[in-house]
């Protein structure tokens, strides 16, 4: 029995290496040529208690080298801190007060998740019917945008007639907890949503990174606006799914220049962040949860454990662990961490399993989707 487990683990890692869309490769496609004319853009930022990050987000946006017109709509999502005051202060300091609209968010209604409701208010109340903006850039309030990020996203959607383009920004990775968990977070995401498949218009798989998403306004209108995903906790991938449906093109890539300013100093903070949507990813299914538990144990935890077993079992387990480390290494290097962190992925996977179990427990006790002081459910 143990030998069969080791063979299964090795076979799965061999398949992920050779047959799963090269998800582990850190690739960067060339930026397409610039469009003949630069379309206008409205940036929508849902912000709930983001005083610590909003200044850098706005500073980085107003430092863009984008040649076209763009302005910012920030939704004050019932903030309990000085987010709005900080936004006004940086706008005044950079002489951008005319380019900033602050929308006071209404209370969260039944049937909507918090972030999507804030995004929807930014679109519905921040853009008038006469507004001729061609694109909406949805940005989180804790992103430091690279100086050419907006220019690049526009070049990509214009050159290939995409309806959505998004960057997965570089997450903060300074504390020991972040070194252990953050590169794996991106690695697991790319495993679920191989970028090559997401970017293939013929493949139904859709994914996006909500920190920086450029959406064609006509595409948003086509799907009925953000009401189409009003109950979704994983809003970015849900929006990508709705937009890509029917063969419309989308693009997802890694950014080296845009970064998240949100820090996680303690392991518990990252576990709670993962637990917010982990069970949602499993569609709230107990059967899928059991499959996830078995899969994580067989694929990630078993290989190093099996090294102490019999000869061929140890060989298969060792090879599986070697391939696992080899595939994870590019992501560890992308985050400028020691290669030794790649070897501890089995420990990291076990912690993600704990976060998934916590997510399921919260959902079954009526506390699913906890975020910034709100409990929200997709049902």
Image (cartoon, grey):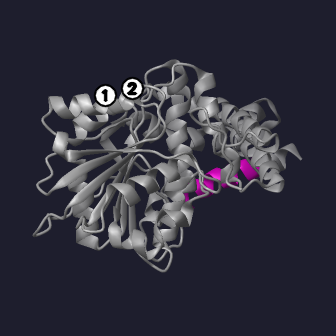
Horizontal relation, residue 5 to residue 200: left or right:
right
Task: Assess whether residue 376 is covered by the magenta stretch.
Answer: no
Pointers 1 and 2 in contact (C-beta within 8 Å): yes
In the foreground, 368 or 247: 368
The structure residue drawn at horizontal position 17% and vertical position 45%, both measured from the top left corner, is 98
Q: Position of residue 61 (x, y in %)?
A: 24, 42
**Neighbours of disc 2 within 10 Å: few (<14), some (14-19), many (20+):** some
Label 1 and label 2: CA atoms lie apart by 6 Å
The structure residue drawn at horizontal position 71% and vertical position 42%, both measured from the top left corner, is 368
Horizontal relation, residue 152 to residue 169: left or right:
left
Quadrant in which the C terminus appears: bottom right
**Neighbours of disc 1 within 10 Å: few (<14), some (14-19), many (20+):** some
Horizontal relation, residue 71 to residue 169: left or right:
left
Q: Position of residue 209 (x, y in %)?
A: 45, 51
In magenta, the rendered stretch is: 6-19
Q: Answer yes or no: is residue 336 visible.
A: no
Q: Position of residue 141 (x, y in %)?
A: 39, 38
Q: Position of residue 137 (x, y in %)?
A: 32, 54
Q: Answer yes or no: is residue 145 visible.
A: yes
Residue identified by numbered label 1: 86
The image quarter in which residue 360 lies: top right
Q: Is residue 68 above or below residue 371?
A: below
Residue identified by numbered label 2: 82
In the foreground, 208 or 242: 242
């Amino acid at each position: 029995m143990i030998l069969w487990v080791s063979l299964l683990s090795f076979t799965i890692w061999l398949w992920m290496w050779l047959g799963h869309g090269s998800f582990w490769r850190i690739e960067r496609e060339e930026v397409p040529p610039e469009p003949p004319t630069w379309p206008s853009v409205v940036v929508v930022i849902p912000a709930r208690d983001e005083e610590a990050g909003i200044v850098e987000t706005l500073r980085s946006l107003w430092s863009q080298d984008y040649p076209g017109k763009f302005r910012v709509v920030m939704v004050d999502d019932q903030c309990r801190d000085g987010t709005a005051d900080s936004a006004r202060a940086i706008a005044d300091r950079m002489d951008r007060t005319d380019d900033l609209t602050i929308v006071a968010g209404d209370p969260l209604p039944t049937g909507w998740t918090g972030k999507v409701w804030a995004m929807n208010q930014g679109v519905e109340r921040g853009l008038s019917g006469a507004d001729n903006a061609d694109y909406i850039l949805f940005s989180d309030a804790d992103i430091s945008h690279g100086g050419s990020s907006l220019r690049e996203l526009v070049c990509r959607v214009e050159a290939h007639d995409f309806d959505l383009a998004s960057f997965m920004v570089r997450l903060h990775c300074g504390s020991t907890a972040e070194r252990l968990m953050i590169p794996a977070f991106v690695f697991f995401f790319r495993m679920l949503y191989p970028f090559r498949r997401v970017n293939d218009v013929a493949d139904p798989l859709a994914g996006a990174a909500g920190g920086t998403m450029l959406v064609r306004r006509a595409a948003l209108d086509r799907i009925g606006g953000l009401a189409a995903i009003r109950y979704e906790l994983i809003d970015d991938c849900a929006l990508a799914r709705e937009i890509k449906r029917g063969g419309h093109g989308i693009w997802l890539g890694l950014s080296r220049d845009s970064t998240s300013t949100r820090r996680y100093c303690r392991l518990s903070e990252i576990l709670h962040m993962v637990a917010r949507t982990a069970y949602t990813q499993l569609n709230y299914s107990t059967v899928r949860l059991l499959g996830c538990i078995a899969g994580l144990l067989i694929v990630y935890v078993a290989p190093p454990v099996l090294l102490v077993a019999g000869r061929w079992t140890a060989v298969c387990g060792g090879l599986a662990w070697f391939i696992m480390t080899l595939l994870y290494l590019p992501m560890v290097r992308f985050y400028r961490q020691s290669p030794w962190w790649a070897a501890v992925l089995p420990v990291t996977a076990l912690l993600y399993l704990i976060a998934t179990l916590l997510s399921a427990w919260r959902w079954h006790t009526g506390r699913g989707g906890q975020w910034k002081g709100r409990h929200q459910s997709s049902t």
